[in-house]
Amino acid sequence: MGKGKILIYDFGTTAVKTVLFDENIQILDVITTELSYDYPEDRYVEFDAETYWEIAVNTAKEIITRNQCQDSLEIISIASQAETVIPVDSKGNCLRKAMVWLDTRAVKENDDLKNSIDVHSFYRITGLNDMDPIWPINKIKWLKNNEPQLYSDTAKFLLLKDYVLFKLTGEFVTDPSICSFSGYFDIGKKEWSERLLDLAELDANKLPRLEESEEIIGTLKPEVQKMFGLERPIQVMNGMLDQSGSAIGAGNIEEGSLTETTGTVLALASTIRNLDSLDLHDRVPIVCHGVADKYLALTFCQTAGILLKWFRDNFCEIEIQEAARSNEDVYDILTRKARPDSINKRLIILPHFGGATSPVVNPDASGVIFGLNLDTNKGDIVKGIMESVAFLLKENYTFLLNSGFHIDKVRSLGGGAKSPFWLQIKSDVLNREFETIESEESTSRGCAFLAGKQLGLYDDLDEICRKIKTKDCYRPDPRKVEIYEQKYRLYLDLYNSLGEVFKKSSRY
């Protein structure tokens, strides 16, 4: 087998994927490990951080052995979710369970932060358009307030990617794309914000050092090398935020590109060169790209594909049993129940089952199914959920356009990109073309693109991104565009009319 093999970990919300690429950045093998979290109290979401490392060791060992690449593996890196906090001692030992990014216990700390700095100033430093209990600045302050001895004993507060990097190399290091979601990182200066750390009364010396995503931070520790069944040192590249990885993996490295990822959540990413070139209104979240000299506008909505899972788990036992008998995907069965040629003009679903986050932040908002009647069936609800995510996509897409973004093409990623039915709805709702790409695993592939560049497999990212091939193109159906435009206006009217109801219901 040839040299230049690349191993990438993709630490997602619901699973860890360990992906092996060849020297042409083609997938050789993938191992997926499902994750389940602990919920000890309301708002608490935790996970045994050592289990992350056990998964990393076991899957690397298996994929290396299975593909006999002990002599050809050249580099390892990581793409990861951002806001999971892991306190460790000076030897990198975990001092408590990880506070997963979904954990929202730090409400008081978030309120304190809001009282100490205005949103405009916070945005100008961090690029984050609101203050949220999930940001690490609030999680770490919660630990200081509620577990003071642990805070004192902590040598470093690491994010998930940083923790696995330490276990691999012995280096305490992080990168700008991950830290863009910390709440204490200055995205313009690419350094820790003294002002925000002072306001939160946190110690900068308890944070890892900063290096760009593409930097080689070291080699595997000898004991890890042995665990992986390797007989020579392997380079480890810093790595990046998962959404940045998927953007690079889809060729989203220049202005004019937009990638939309419909997975558990909905995320829109568009590349920016100049932070001062847009009318951002303090509302478009901006993060550092995995590409060193660029940024990403990244709007993020907490509930998208997870709504279909919610509907499946609670209302579709018959379809689940049918899928088990026929060895089919239950979502394919549910999609067949939706009527492709008809649009239920009255049925409107608001997808804010976890609150609204973008383009308007409203934690009081909730999910709504409006317009039910005796003719409504499961297929209508399935299609209504897909339409609601498409409307949410249109809200964010329109907001980016109104903020000065020029978008030449839209590429769809994530589980939602596997559904032609859903992609056609999106095309009809937004009245523009949507592309999918041939390559799967765009998150780990984007990280592998940077790793391949470090190995000298190509001269620059443009070279490899030009080779990304379009798989399918979905064009709007003129017959449905106007109907969906009318339904979209009703969707907005419904949300706006429920503002006071959302506020009152949140008190109970």
Image: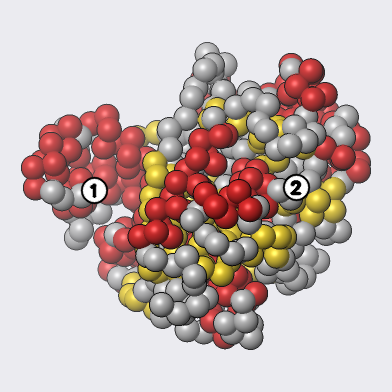
- Looking at the rendered structure, the kind of residue marked 2 is Phe
User: Image point 61% across, 76% down: which residue?
Assistant: 455
Q: Is there CB contact under 8 Å for labels 1 and 2?
A: no
User: Image point 23% across, 31% down: which residue?
Assistant: 315
Q: Is residue 318 above or below residue 211?
A: above
Mark 1 to mark 2 CA distance (whole Å): 42 Å
Residue 468, percent from left and from top: 46, 79
User: Image point 20% across, 35% down: which residue?
Assistant: 316
Q: Secondary structure at mark 1?
A: helix
Residue hosting label 2: 172
Residue 220, percent from left and from top: 63, 56
Residue 420, percent from left and from top: 28, 64
Which of the two labelled residues, at mark 1 and mark 2, occupies the earlier sequence position? 2
Q: Is residue 346 left or right of residue 72?
A: left
Q: Secondary structure at mark 2?
A: loop
User: Image point 78% across, 46% down: which residue?
Assistant: 208
Q: Is residue 261 above or below residue 368?
A: below
Residue hosting label 1: 331
Q: Residues within 10 Å of mark 2 (few under 14, many from 20)?
A: many
